[in-house]
Image (cartoon, grey):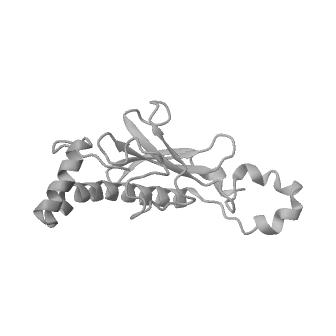
Amino acid sequence: MSEWMDEPDREDFEHAGLKCLILRHHEFGHLCGYVAVPKGHPCHGKDYDHTPYDDLIPVEVHGGLTFSREGDGDTWSKGYWWFGFDCAHAWDLIPYMTSLMSDLKALMSTLMSSTYKNFRYVRRETEDLAEQVVTLEFIDWEFTWVWPLLLPPRAARKIWSKRRKDGYSSTKLHCDG
């Protein structure tokens, strides 16, 4: 019997104050992890390969982020922007593929080094993703409001006037992604 036969296909939970979801792919059987951010979060509406400050603090999760979209109210809660990763990359053991292994004897030595990413592993990765996304919100606030205070007044005025021109306001935090 395989490990994935005893695992749940879905779990909704909260971590670091964010909605999280682990979901098994309906066709291939691998797990995917997702984290939701509310409107107003600097990552809301951003593409998974263009998160805020990704050049300074890249989001690191198994295989990298591979998913971002608005919640549909079905699988993903509406009113949130969801980011996710999957465990169907090279060297990941995908449950569906195990049925093909007997036909792929030539690749067995390569596939034997593959590992299945179990529910506990995906839970840890999803929690780690939630913590990183929360950190981006604090960094956005610091870059927007704290750092200009440390600059000489002329440089700070220049930054704030550019922010006003670009749509930043003191009542709503934004970020350039």
Residue 4 is at least partly visible in this image = yes
Give the camera-side residue of 175 and 107: 175
Residue 168 is at least partly visible in this image = no
Tell me if 120 is positioned left or right of 70 in this view. right
Q: How many marks?
A: 0
Q: Picture quarter containing residue 166? A: top left
Give coordinates of residue 68: x percent, y percent.
48, 44
Classify the position of the N terminus by image quarter: bottom right
Give coordinates of residue 7: x percent, y percent.
59, 51
Q: At x 44% / y 35%, what residue is drawn?
A: 71
Q: At x 55% / y 56%, what residue is drawn?
A: 119
Q: Picture quarter containing residue 89? A: bottom right
Looking at this view, name the residue that lies furthest to the top: 73
Q: At x 34% / y 56%, what residue is drawn?
A: 136
Q: Picture quarter containing residue 102? A: bottom right
Give the camera-side residue of 7 and 79: 79
Give coordinates of residue 117: x percent, y percent.
61, 59
Tell me if 136 is positioned left or right of 119 in this view. left
Give the camera-side residue of 61 and 125: 61
Give coordinates of residue 3: x percent, y percent.
65, 57
Looking at this view, name the residue that lies furthest to the left: 153
Q: Is residue 110 above or below residue 41?
A: below
Give the camera-side residue of 64 and 106: 64
Tell me if 49 is positioned left or right of 1 in this view. left
